[in-house]
Amino acid sequence: MKISSVIDDFKVVGDPYYQEFTFYTFEDMHASSVEVEVGELLYSLVRCEKPDWVVELGTNLGISTLFLAQALRDNVKGRLITVDNDGNRVERARHVINKADISTYVEFHVTDSRSLNHVQSIDMIFFDTEHDFDQVNSEINTYYDRVRHNGLLLFHDIMMFGGVKDAVNQMKNRGPFQELIVPIQGRGFGIYRKLG
């Protein structure tokens, strides 16, 4: 799998591109990105759901982007739109995706996470930007109506940050959901299937 070879490159020797941004080891990158287990879960969800449109709010270093895009490639369908307000992070993520040779499945945006207006029907959305209530709640309000019936809303760090949990609890008042919280490394990953 391409993912393991790209990650192994960072683990073993470090990537010169990342050294410019003082990320010298995989452990350094991992500390500020999603856990590998979350990446594997994202990969599995995309493989099972076969979405046409995936939105990722919070590109960060591109590790979750890598897992999502690889799954779309393995599905031979779908498109990932990823957004982050930090251009340096997006460039690092673009480097990761190019290295894995899966850039045809990814559209990068450097803008506020609530500014994607061109996607009107979302099959799966992954929330992982700021973890305060106002930010997450605003993102939910921006995209909720665009998530199709039976679409997935995915939340990283739902057990670690009260703002994420509180915003999700408020979202649950909007209609019926199937809910699963996976306690990955105590940070939590929330999976919500929109039924209504």
Image (cartoon, rainbow, N blue to C red):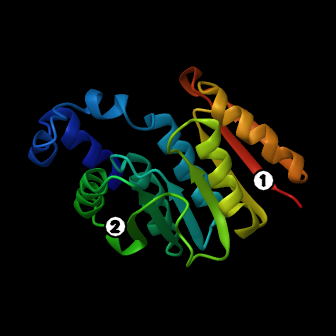
Q: Where does the image place residue 112, in percent across and percent down from the top left?
A: 46, 59
Quadrant of the image containing the C terminus: bottom right
- Badge 1: residue crowd in 10 Å (few <14, some 14–19, many ≥20): some
Q: Quadrant of residue 31?
A: top left
- Badge 2: residue crowd in 10 Å (few <14, some 14–19, many ≥20): some
User: Looking at this view, is 14 or 82 the one in front?
Assistant: 82
Amino acid type at image mark 1: Arg
The residue that mark 1 highlights is 193
Q: Where does the image place residue 130, in percent across and percent down from the top left?
A: 51, 40
Q: Residue at x 74, y 41 (%)?
A: 168
Left or right for 167, reference 22: right
Element class at badge 2: loop
Amino acid type at image mark 2: Ile
Q: Residue at x 59, y 45 (%)?
A: 135
Left or right for 148, reference 24: right
> Disc 1, disc 2: CB below 8 Å?
no
Q: Is residue 126 above or below residue 186?
A: below
Q: Quadrant of residue 132?
A: top right
Mark linked to residue 72: none
Q: Is residue 59 above or below residue 151?
A: above
Element class at badge 1: strand
